[in-house]
Image (cartoon, rainbow, N blue to C red):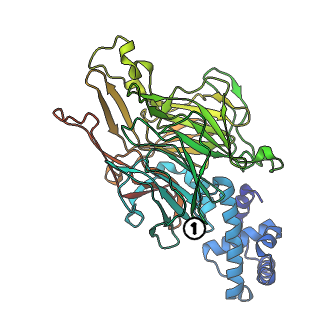
Amino acid sequence: MEPHDSNRALSAGDDADSEADAAAITRAMGLLSTHEERPSLLLSLPTEIICRIMHQLASGGDFAPAAIAASTCVTLRDAAAWWWHETALGMLGDDMCWDGPNATFQVVSGASTLSHAKWQPAPHLHLPFHSFAHSSVLWQGKLYLFGGRHNDVYRTGLHSLSLPPLAPEWKEIPTRGTPPEPRRAHTACVHKGLLYILGGGQANATIGHGDMHVIDLSLRSWTQLPSPPDWQAFGHTCVVASLSSSTLRIPPFKSRLGKQHRPLAQIPQRQPSSASDSACLIVFGGAWQSSASGFIHATNRVLRFDISNELWEEVHPRGRAPEDRYRHTSCIVGQSMAVWGGYVLHAHVMQPRQHQVTAGDKFACMNADDLFLLDLNTYKWSSPVVNGTPPSPRGGHSMVLVHNKLVIYGGGDLTYTYGMEQWHERDVGTVHWLDTTTWTYGAPSIPNDEVPEVRGGHTSHLISHEGKLCLLVLGGRRYLPPSPEDGNAGGEHFGRVDAHLLQLSK
């Protein structure tokens, strides 16, 4: 049953009061209560009956006396929740935190009502310590936190947080094996219960990390995997790509070169049938600090890791690629990887002695606000023409796909003063979205007294909380710029411990 079928049926749910409907619902619930394969049987029932039953459950309506036996209702509720859960996961991926049968509708309605987004503090979800540039992933109703930085302290432990409807509680996870070294600005991806940690490093360290580690979240044992060839980076991105997964419908678009492109995805997608459908990790961009010159260098390389065979390969996409960058964001949109923003490092910044640059010059062009799409079928870059007012150029932000909108939050801008050898940084706290059906930017109107303190280096996740679809924001940086007489040219970088929820649905 497709989501639009359930929407159509639910719109007629209030008409399910006839005796025939009540009798059919009663028979269906009685059958469910005695059948061993309840979820499968639920899918075989008529669509109208399923939707009317779930409409009644969600609205708290009363059934006929024969249908309200506790065992029958619990059975149906479990089966209905299973179906809605699977539908939500098909739309959002494995990291959707399930919190009731209305969550699927909230995904759609929330994406269409982002203009009414509202912030609220979430002290019960605060991090167990101050941190920024950490990583976090969602898996089976829990959030897993790894690494991060707080001034001169770097972490390597693994923590988990049970999310509502369970009582939220942070726990440090005891693990076996050799964990990754302490780091920040790495990436973490989860696939089928395996958490992959790649790259990262420590500030002002001439040797970054190019290693890759994996931990089975059930067995809790670390293993080091093959490292990418000739690669080390921080501030890169890594996404799990599986072209067999369900994806959203994206309309054709014109690139900046004026060429019409086919849709990114259609519904339904093909079913897995061969090894070509196996999942892989796609890594893009990143930066490292040269041990010879001391300068930071960035890249626009694309790497692919075959999860099944544990093999790395470098991909050389066609089309105009994004400039070398780091601290950008990436996520899967349809059958493409979307890349937005980041810090772009030009040659005259990295090697100023080779150019006639006067002392005191600033390079504001280092901040990007552009969008690129990498087609994961053809490995070709494209850049849609976008409308509306984009977010200010930034890096260190977060980007989450909510139905058909990319929600961008926080981050900061970065400039460099040559001659004074200073980096100038400023965090921001605005929320924007990019509608992938029209490639149009938008922004909610949020009262200033509700907005959290500005930050970058946080993490964001889409969760269902107390019956509402929310964007959960964890930690982030609290930056103190250097004073004129301060010898610390980079300022001080502290982590935050707070958590906030951006309510997306009414």
Is 211 on the left or on the right of 317, as rendered?
Answer: left
Q: Is residue 186 above or below residue 171?
A: above
Residue found 57% across the figure and 51% down from its top: 213
User: Residue 332 at x, y = what percent?
Assistant: 62, 43
Q: How many marks?
A: 1
Is 275 on the left or on the right of 212, as rendered?
Answer: right
Residue 76 at least partly seen: yes
Residue found 69% across the figure and 62% down from its top: 86
Is 262 on the left or on the right of 504, as rendered?
Answer: right
User: Residue 7 at x, y = what percent?
Assistant: 70, 59
User: Residue 291 at x, y = what percent?
Assistant: 41, 30
Q: Is residue 277 above or below residue 370?
A: below
User: Residue 112 at x, y = what percent?
Assistant: 57, 49
Pointer 1 residue? 99
Residue found 39% across the figure and 27% down from its top: 295
Residue found 38% across the figure and 49% down from its top: 149
Is 336 on the left or on the right of 36, as rendered?
Answer: left
Name the residue nearer the viewer: 165 or 109.
Answer: 165
- For label 1, the SS is loop
Tell me which corner region of the image, top left, top right, bottom left or bottom right, holds residue 82: bottom right
